[in-house]
Image (cartoon, rainbow, N blue to C red):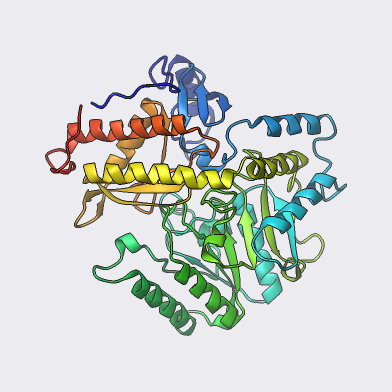
Amino acid sequence: MLTVERRFIKLNTEIPGPNARALLERRVKNVPQGVSNTVPSFAEKGEGALLTDVDGNTFIDFAGAIGTLNAGHCPPKVVEALKKQLDKYIHPGFNVMMYEPYIQLAEKLNQITPGSHAKKTFFLNSGAEAVENAVKIARKYTGRRAIISFDRGFHGRTLLAMSLTSKVKPYKFGFGPFAPDTYKMRYPYYYRAPYGITHEELDKQILVQLEEFFLSEVPAEDVAAIIMEPVQGEGGFVIPSKAFVQGVKNICEKYGILFIADEVQTGFGRTGKMFAMEHFEVVPDLMTMSKSIAAGLPISAVTGRAEIMDAANPGEIGGTYGGSPLGCVAALQVIEMMEEECLVDRANVIGEKILSRFQQMKETFNCIGDVRGLGAMCALEVVKDRQTKEPDKELTARIVQECYRQGVIILSAGLYGNVIRLLSPLVITDEQLEEGLEVMESVFSTIVQGERTVEGCFNDEKTVVY
């Protein structure tokens, strides 16, 4: 087996250790099983890209709370700002008595989001709430009812957001009926495109189908908005072409349909731009944000064209905890940190390192069918056979499990559950990144050697040293 020099990973006991096992017993008795967990342990301390559990095991965090911690665990400036805010007031409720941090953060997001037009922003608690409210505003402004989302898209677990989400299990199975007037269109998945079709041909085919959809399913005059993840997150880090995204925006403009960019997972520097839509040179009418805004504080935002955002009358949008002072001051510090420490540029450096290593692993392991990424939003797809591209969900789960047992936290994703996605904090050091990637490669070698060699998961041309 490949030997990995552990500089940051510290494993004192098996996972879960004795303290974690005691907490797991309490968890089973008191928390519903429907709340899933990747690692069967409990956090004690987080710093940067490292997490230490209650048994003293230290992990390299390649999950970042599912992309929430681009600024890392417990950034000192954020912690300091929160302590200062706690001494002033915790939550007067913006709907009752307003406070300046809310206005400051709205001003900042209006400034840094794509587009030079006048914008307005308001705040909520979660990504799903942001999606629901963006749809409410779109319907109010246009006077139309229908919303179109895309295959493999994920927009949240609340009723409307779940209705817009594509993956049935575990998100939708048994939870119907769903919200009406929601429809789904294809989204280009170039790796799994029909044999022989080019990216350009696939894009054109889907865009033609979208216009035909207005004839066969719902008239364009009834469509309020199309909502799109510029890079699909839970869908498996599927990246469309610039031509496709621009094509969808052109169709929206042609029929007076609003374009909603769901940047909940892609936002705040993850893709090597502050917002992923910048890669595609498309300015959305509305944008939803949440993950990585505030280093883990629960806050989300909807930013949009001022005239659209003003369609709702007083009291029609908002919520008791929306835009809490703690979330606002944390977000302001995160944005300042990202600008001062050039974390958007850092995302591109991280992404180059990850994709380079993934490409090398692909040359070694036939079970890696595809490698893709935009900035630090990187993934590899695990298959049983490169020719058939049959997904291997079981092997993916084994790899995720063995990685955390070896001190690296990673996540799976994708419609078939066979994509390994990395969402490490952008403050991760080169040394931490390298050690984590070495562990991942070692895990692939171990599992493949033990279970898949006969099936040809290794490339015969490559030699792996054990």
Residue 137 relative to residue 203: left or right: right
Which of the 4 quarters of the picture holds residue 412?
top left
Which of the 4 quarters of the picture holds residue 83?
top right
Above or below 11: residue 50: below
Residue 231's spot in the image, x, y percent?
48, 57
Residue 293 or 167: which is nearer the viewer? Answer: 293
Above or below 435: residue 133: below
Residue 90 relative to residue 169: left or right: right
Q: Can residue 135 be seen in this view?
A: no
Identify which residue is drawn at 54% across, 57% down: 276
Residue 109's spot in the image, x, y percent?
71, 54
Q: In which quadrant will I find the N terminus?
A: top left
Above or below 49: residue 302: below
Q: Can residue 361 be seen in this view?
A: yes
Residue 251 or 392: which is nearer the viewer? Answer: 251
Q: How many marks?
A: 0
Residue 241's spot in the image, x, y percent?
43, 66
Identify which residue is drawn at 15% across, 38% down: 453
Residue 290's spot in the image, x, y percent?
62, 49
Identify which residue is drawn at 68% across, 76% down: 143
Residue 344 relative to residue 150: left or right: right
Identify which residue is drawn at 44% across, 76% down: 207
Q: In which quadrant will I find the C terminus?
A: top left
Residue 351 or 161: which is nearer the viewer? Answer: 351
Residue 291 or 127: which is nearer the viewer? Answer: 291
Which residue reaches farthest right?
97
Which residue reaches farthest bottom?
215
